[in-house]
């Protein structure tokens, strides 16, 4: 951990967690695990945008990136296990020091200030909230991960079918939240115990409750996580070639299915009982968007094919 006296998130972490009524052992364990998580967040946020460092990827660079993401997922899985234990002990100590925390436990959203509320108005709202200020949304790289990997020689359809883009996006969002929270943790004496309690609960919900079980590990055989997904992509890449024509044919098939769904919505929009959870109008717009996305995907894949053919001809 960095040992500078000012301007570093790890110093704020030590000072912000100490003196809140928790035993030294519980505080030290939480500082250690949050520190490890913060280091992985700093590394991971740089790793998850490979197009910035390799705008023209080779197969070797694509494989190296996949293996690094796999190793990051493994480390995060181990850290979240340790974090679950450390958080449980620390939060229990906070509850012992302030019984009102345990007595008023409700879903986090019931304690949170409306994120869209005006900041000036929120000064007069005494509702407990997490300690960190509002942050901007995470903006992924200029090119989708699935297209970057396609240009590195990996099949687009394999990457999409295992849900890798969604897992990478969720990991980037969670790591950004963690790093933002650690960087903005106030020093001891400024942070209220209720704010710290809610903030740690939210970090636990995002990492232990969501990232690990829903994105790193498999939910079931049909919804595989990051680790299984990357293993599958690398296995396919080692056993078969991945010509881009196969991806284009597959994408055209998905486009045809989306267009059929759109036609079905339009035929049903004239009347009759609607048991769908979305209105016909909303559902129609959603399918139209899906059609547009597949059309754009095919255009992008065809552009990659042209670029590869031009490069090979030189």
Image (cartoon, rainbow, N blue to C red):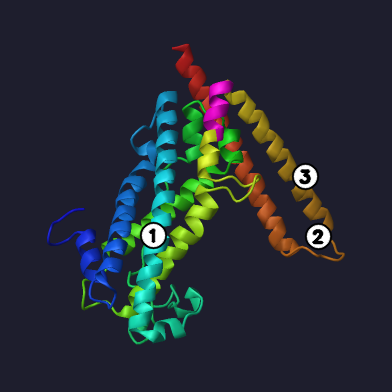
Q: Are marks 1 and 3 in contact (CB under 8 Å)?
A: no
User: Residue 45: in sight, yes or no?
Assistant: yes
Residue 269 is tagged as 2
Q: Residues within 10 Å of mark 1 (few under 14, many from 20)?
A: many
Residue at 50 percent of width and 25 percent of height: 153
- The residue tagged 1 is 83
User: Is residue 233 on the magenta stretch?
Assistant: yes
Q: Give left or right: position of 230 versus 71.
A: right
Q: Viewer-proximal residue, 44 or 73? A: 73
Inter-mark Cα distance, 1 to 3: 47 Å
State the residue lying farthest toward the top.
Answer: 314
Q: Is residue 105 above or below residue 219?
A: below
**Magenta part of the protein: which range?**
232-240
Q: Is residue 236 above or below residue 264?
A: above
Asked which secondary structure carries label 1, the reply is: helix
Residue at 67 percent of width and 32 percent of height: 250
Q: Viewer-proximal residue, 119 or 207? A: 207
Magenta stretch secondary structure, dominant: helix
* Image spot of residue 156 (x, y percent): 57, 33
Q: Are marks 2 and 3 in contact (CB under 8 Å)?
A: no
Q: Is residue 128 above or below residue 48?
A: below
* Image spot of residue 96 (x, y percent): 36, 81
* Image spot of residue 57 (x, y percent): 41, 28
- The residue tagged 3 is 260
Q: Give left or right: position of 166 versus 130.
A: right
N-terminal of the pair, mark 2 or mark 3, is 3
């Amino acid at each position: 951990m960095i040992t500078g006296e000012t301007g570093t998130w790890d110093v704020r972490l030590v000072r912000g967690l100490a003196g809140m009524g928790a035993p030294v052992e519980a505080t030290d364990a939480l500082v250690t695990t949050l520190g490890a998580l913060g280091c992985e967040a700093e590394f991971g946020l740089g790793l998850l945008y490979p197009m910035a460092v390799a705008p023209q990827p080779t197969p070797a660079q694509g494989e190296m990136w996949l293996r690094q993401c796999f190793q990051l997922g493994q480390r995060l899985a181990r850290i979240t296990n340790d974090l679950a234990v450390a958080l449980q002990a620390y939060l229990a100590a906070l509850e012992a020091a302030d019984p009102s925390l345990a007595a008023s436990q409700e879903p986090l959203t019931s304690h949170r200030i409306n994120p869209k509320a005006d900041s000036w108005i929120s000064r007069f709202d005494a509702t407990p909230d997490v300690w960190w200020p509002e942050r901007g949304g995470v903006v992924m790289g200029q090119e989708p991960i699935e297209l970057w990997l396609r240009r590195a020689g990996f099949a687009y359809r394999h990457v999409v079918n295992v849900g890798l883009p969604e897992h990478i996006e969720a990991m980037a969002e969670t790591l950004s939240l963690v790093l933002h929270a650690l960087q903005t943790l106030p020093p001891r004496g400024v942070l209220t115990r209720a704010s710290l309690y809610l903030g740690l609960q939210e970090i636990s919900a995002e990492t232990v409750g969501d990232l690990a079980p829903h994105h790193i590990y498999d939910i079931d055989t049909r919804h595989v996580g990051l680790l299984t997904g990357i293993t599958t992509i690398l296995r396919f890449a080692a056993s078969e070639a991945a010509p881009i024509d196969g991806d284009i044919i597959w994408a055209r098939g998905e486009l045809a299915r989306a267009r059929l769904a759109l036609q079905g919505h339009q035929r049903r929009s004239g009347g009759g009982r609607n048991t769908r959870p979305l209105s016909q109008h909303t559902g129609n717009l959603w399918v139209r968007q899906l059609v547009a996305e597949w059309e754009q995907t095919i255009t992008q894949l065809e552009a990659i094919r042209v670029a590869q053919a031009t490069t090979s001809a030189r």
